[in-house]
Image (tube, grey):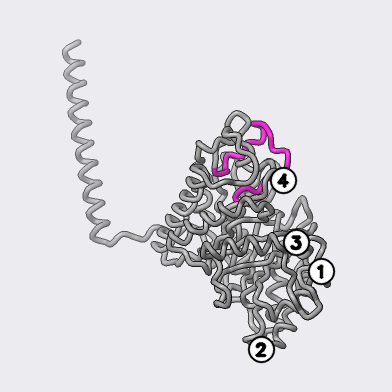
Amino acid sequence: MLIQASILGAAADPKQWKFSCIKEDGSLDEEKYAAFMRFFAHNGANCTRELPFLTTDRNYLGDTKQRNFLPFKFKGGRYDLKLVNPVFFQNLKAMIKIANRHNLAFQYSMFDRSHSLRMPDSPWNLNHQDKRGYYTWDQYTNEYVNRILLTIHEAESELIQEGIICKMLFELENEPFDNGFTATAIETLKRILSSDFKKEQIEDGVFYLPMLAGKPIIEKINYQLIKNPLFEALKRAKRKAGLYPGEGEKDKSRYFTTIHQVDNLIINELIIALKHTRRFSISCDGEKPKPYASQWFDRLLPLFQAAKGLSRREQLLETWKIEHVYRGAIDGESQLGDAIDGILGISQAYHHVFNRLPENFGKFPEVIGKPLPEPLPILQQIKLLKDRVQLVKQQVEENRIIINQVKEIIRGKE
């Protein structure tokens, strides 16, 4: 089971949001981000997530709110998709490395707000190319995806040098309301799979649930799942592209139905869903303020108890994801009144029912920073010292010559 703690907006505008881990120059405040990752891992999380285009408001216009840490540079009041911003990719690489040092898998949402003009502050909707609507697969999208994958591979390579195996997860699209985005999602999927990643690492983002077209996720009569026509059409298209197996084959992909607000009604429906193959991402993203540890504990206890009562073959809880979203500061203060201890409640409920703690729980009392440079072998140190002495001797000799030349000039003038 993925226990995910996410700062949705770690790369937010530092002038507006106190939980931002971005400095004024747009670079990542690595110490602050590492402090968050340590806290989440120490309380049981094994995964974190970052959205690339999460903006701080819906009226993002003008140079005064330039977000120079997005994938594209902001110029003349608009994003220019021709101008890639290297700082964004440097920040992303640092985030991946810091999370993995704390044994947190890093999930990156390739596209956020991929639903037409509903989110006008997306860089794709505000740029010099006058693109409108959902993201189409073109040279700009292709360049963005390629650079993301290159950045991830660089992070993997650098982590290997530290003796750390990089755990990377992808969300293809966050809230894909627009059917037109399907083609871009499929092309992105193909590119990820061709870059040595596996289907098990890929999650296909889905609609806001539990209500879809006025119907609950789960029809309680005969325990049948509701099938929305658009939802199923998108799945069929992606099955053909390789994200999902064929009919009747074992589904190993991370296909989640997202729950954005967890209440008693939803928990009852999720208990029914334990016997179904559809996987669930249970998030508190839709709640304001976010739940405290005690609230998560009370909500999840009946779900975990129901799962324990099923056979291993029947219950699929271990394939689900439970996410605590946090938007506050590392000291627990927040403009939105969020609870920083929420992830602890998930761990406590899990331990109470299954009598085992999440693997990271209690193992990160301190922040893990950048690795210190390894000491050089003694013979190499001696060689460097000898080289240094030789350079000093050479500099002394050059200074002596200059001094003598100056003395000759002074004598000549006398």
Q: Which residue is mark 4?
A: 118
Mark carried by residue 263: 1
Q: Nearer the viewer, mark 2 or mark 1?
A: 2
Instruction: Look at label 1 and name its amino acid.
Output: Asp
Instruction: Look at label 2 and name its amino acid.
Output: Ser
The answer to which of marks 2 and 1 sits earlier in the sequence is 1
Classify mark 2: helix, strand or loop: loop
- Nearest the viewer among 247 and 199 is 247
Residue at x-position 53% and y-position 49%: 91
Q: CA distance from mark 4 to mark 1?
A: 27 Å
Q: Which residue is mark 2?
A: 311
Residue at x-position 73% and y-position 72%: 345
- Nearest the viewer among 81 and 31 is 81
> In the image, 83: left or right of 382?
right
Whether residue 43 appears in this view of the structure is no
The answer to which of marks 2 and 4 sits earlier in the sequence is 4
Q: Which residue is mark 3?
A: 339
Q: Nearer the viewer, mark 4 or mark 1?
A: 4
> In the image, 110: left or right of 280?
left
Dividing the image into 4 quarters, which one contains the C terminus? Answer: top left
Q: Which residues are magenta?
A: 52-71
